[in-house]
Image (cartoon, helix red, strand yellow):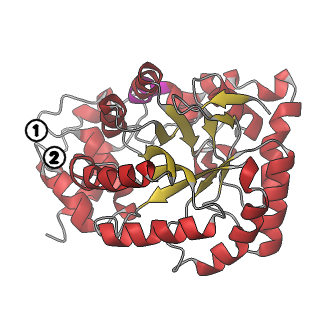
Amino acid sequence: MEYRKLGRTGLEVGAIGLGTEHLENSRDTIEQVIHTAVDGGVNYIDLLSSDPQRDADFWDNFGPVFRTYRDRLILAVNWGEPIRYFDLDYCQRCFEGILERVGNNYVEVVKLMMVDTGAKWNGWAQDSLQCLRRYQKEGRIGTIGMSSHYAPIAIKAVESGLIAVLMYPLNLTSHIREQDKALIQACVDHGVGLVAMKPYGGGSLFFPKGEVAPATPAQCLHYLFSLPVSTTVPGVKNAEELRAALHYWDATAEERDYTQFLADLHHYLAGDCTYCNHCLPCPQGINVGKTIWLADVGQYYSFDEIEPVYAALPARASECTECGVCMERCPFEVDVVAKMRRAVEVFEATV
């Protein structure tokens, strides 16, 4: 295992960490995964579950195994969740429940969960930071961080100096995203530990697309390790998938080589919006990239949270005249007109 500094936190974390979003919830599987992780030098575990009462079965399986290795592991947990994040009392009750279950009443990293809008950063996140600083003064939190899927908000948080760790989706497709490059540099400039989530693109990079061959875990990880990330957290289902990630350290240079995939990246991404806004300016003033992004991620949020962000855009998707100028400019052959129609269905058909 290679160990890297987690930004300015003073912690050193294994370059390969452990994500638990897709972990099969059985005591046997969890025991195998944690044992495999520890044996492989993994010391950073990102825990998705933020409500111990709702997810009691998971905690009954995960807690005893985790506590066996507590002094060798760095735990990152979420503060809040996508739906009930606005209820600070609920966030605090959940966090207190986690503290009771981790074995030493202490969590190394606490992340504000899914801060993807300006309203959430300026409102809920600031109120939450006050709560978390109190825990920090009490010695129950080591570092305050944040997770985000939207680079402009993530950059704002990094530059604020208020967070020391950022979890953000990075993988081979980030190679052509200028906003991701800007975010990575901001983390370097401000000493923020960068945790790469979705290193395999949610598993999509393992499937061929057209004539482009699928990527492998070793290729995905080698690309990330060429960047100034602190760690990455593959979301494994079982020990076999974790061993596939840890095989990276035994992989040959040929197995790790991702250059051909990058050479084919434009073909791989054909039809997929990367929110790059190379299609702009729109004659109607539509922010095409952000509009499509909001429609894409809307399934993960409550409508009441995401719709005001859409409503604040300078022009709505329904103002699209289907002139096709954006599609002529798009480097990835995206059917922008169809995506504008989809945004109308998501945000305007219910208004």
Q: Is residue 43 left or right of residue 114?
A: right
- Binning the other alpha carbons within 10 Å of mark 1 as few (below 14), some (14 to 19) or many (20 upward) gives some
Residue placed most toward the observer, 299 or 140: 140
Tag 2: residue type?
Answer: Cys
Q: Can the viewer see residue 83?
A: yes
Vertical side of 173 occupied by 319: above or below: below
Region rendered in magenta: 176-181
Q: How many discs appear? A: 2
Q: Position of residue 53 (x, y in %)?
A: 52, 80
For the stretch drawn in magenta, the main secondary structure is helix
Q: Is residue 183 left or right of residue 280?
A: right
Residue 75 - label: none
Name the residue tied to disc 2: 320
Toward the front, the furthest residue is 138
Tag 1: residue type?
Answer: Gln
Q: Position of residue 225 (x, y in %)?
A: 66, 27
Q: Can the viewer see residue 345?
A: no
Q: Position of residue 50 (x, y in %)?
A: 50, 66
Name the residue tied to disc 1: 284
Q: Quadrant of the N terminus?
A: top right
| Secondary element type, mark 1 | loop
Residue placed most toward the observer, 138 or 171: 138
Vertical side of 316 occupied by 57: above or below: below
- Are discs 2 and 1 less than 8 Å apart at CB? yes
Q: Give the mark, 2 or 1, whose residue is nearer the N terminus.
A: 1
Residue placed most toward the observer, 81 or 99: 99
- Binning the other alpha carbons within 10 Å of mark 2 as few (below 14), some (14 to 19) or many (20 upward) gives many
Name the quadrant containing residue 330: top left
Look at the image and say whether residue 180 sits in the magenta stretch: yes
Residue located at (72% from left, 30% from top) = 3
